[in-house]
Amino acid sequence: MATRIPLIAGNWKLNLDHNEAIHLVQKLAWSLKDAKHDFAAAEVVVLPSFTAIRSVQTLVDADKLEIGYGAQDVSAHASGAYTGEVSAAQLAKLGVSYVAVGHSERREYHAESDAVVAAKAVAAFGAGIVPIVCVGEGLDVRKAGEQVPYTLAQLEGSLAGLTPEQVAKVVIAYEPVWAIGTGEVATPEDAQEVAAAIRARLAELYSAEIADAVRVLYGGSVKSSNVASILDKQDVDGALVGGASLDPEEFAKIARFQ
Ligand code: PEP
């Protein structure tokens, strides 16, 4: 069985300028150091706004921090007349290791379809960046008890065009939309149900080895008070954390599952 190192990723959303980003990463690094955080036991990553990535890179390099960093989105295009977009190659130049694609806020406010998300994931891998592919159902779907088929359809559509070797490296974030930023956290059993279904579908579509290698994160109102019970579940390999990642001490606690 593959060893899946848990990943704790902080999605800062539209928050923090580059100075604030530096302060947060410094405080996070101190908190993790104080707690003797073992980065081999849980990878810690922050996803700042594009404008703060260069500053985070400079700090991480200067202080030789083990904290990783990524972006919250990427263009599906390599270059050209796409005003306002940022390419995967431009992010790779900044040392970015991960990029979130298909976050529910992008899907909702920017009408991103599964096909667009898949194209972004392909573009990310093309530049050597690992996409964190976000999937998850809204409240109406959950109330109808359709969360598994809905999320699996999104998964399949969002991975279209990736090679099996790429899928083996992808990170999936299961984020029920009704739990994002609402304080309404899914139960550990809810998270496990969909995470296990995602892994089973990956085994059907690709192979058991690939399914075993893929990290499936849970996201939706994760805090230090609920992280341990969620990550205790067999198929949950980490967390995508929004609001709570803006508090460095709280985020450091989450990274230690406590
Ligand atoms: C997110 O933005 O991906 C998220 C899960 O947010 P929150 O933790 O605030 O619910």
Image (spheres, rainbow, N blue to C red):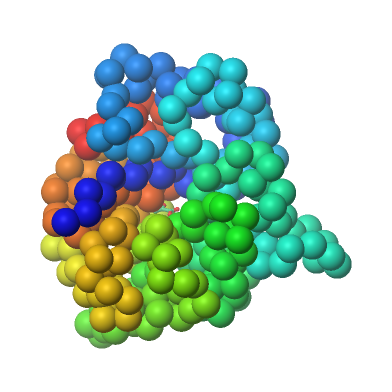
151, above or below 49, in the image:
below
Q: Position of residue 228 (x, y in %)?
A: 17, 42
Q: Where is residue 93 in the image (x, y as percent from the top left)?
A: 68, 42
Q: Position of residue 146 (x, y in %)?
A: 27, 83
* Direction from residue 41 to residue 26 in the image, left or right: right
Query: Looking at the image, can residue 141 be seen?
Result: no
**Corner quadrant of residue 164:** bottom left
In the image, what residue occupies the spot 84% across and 65% down? Answer: 80
- Near-viewer residue (27 or 96): 96
194, above or below 42, in the image:
below
253, above or below 241, in the image:
above
**Corner quadrant of residue 36:** top left
In the image, what residue occupies the spot 34% across and 45% down? Answer: 7
* Direction from residue 80 to residue 26 in the image, left or right: left
- Near-viewer residue (87 or 258): 87
In the image, what residue occupies the spot 72% across and 67% down? Answer: 77
* Direction from residue 168 to residue 63 in the image, left or right: right
Query: Looking at the image, can residue 78 be seen?
Result: yes
- Quarter of the image for the C terminus: give it: top left
- Quarter of the image for the N terminus: give it: bottom left
Q: Position of residue 9 (x, y in %)?
A: 41, 44
In the image, what residue occupies the spot 41% across and 60% down? Answer: 170
**Corner quadrant of residue 165:** bottom left
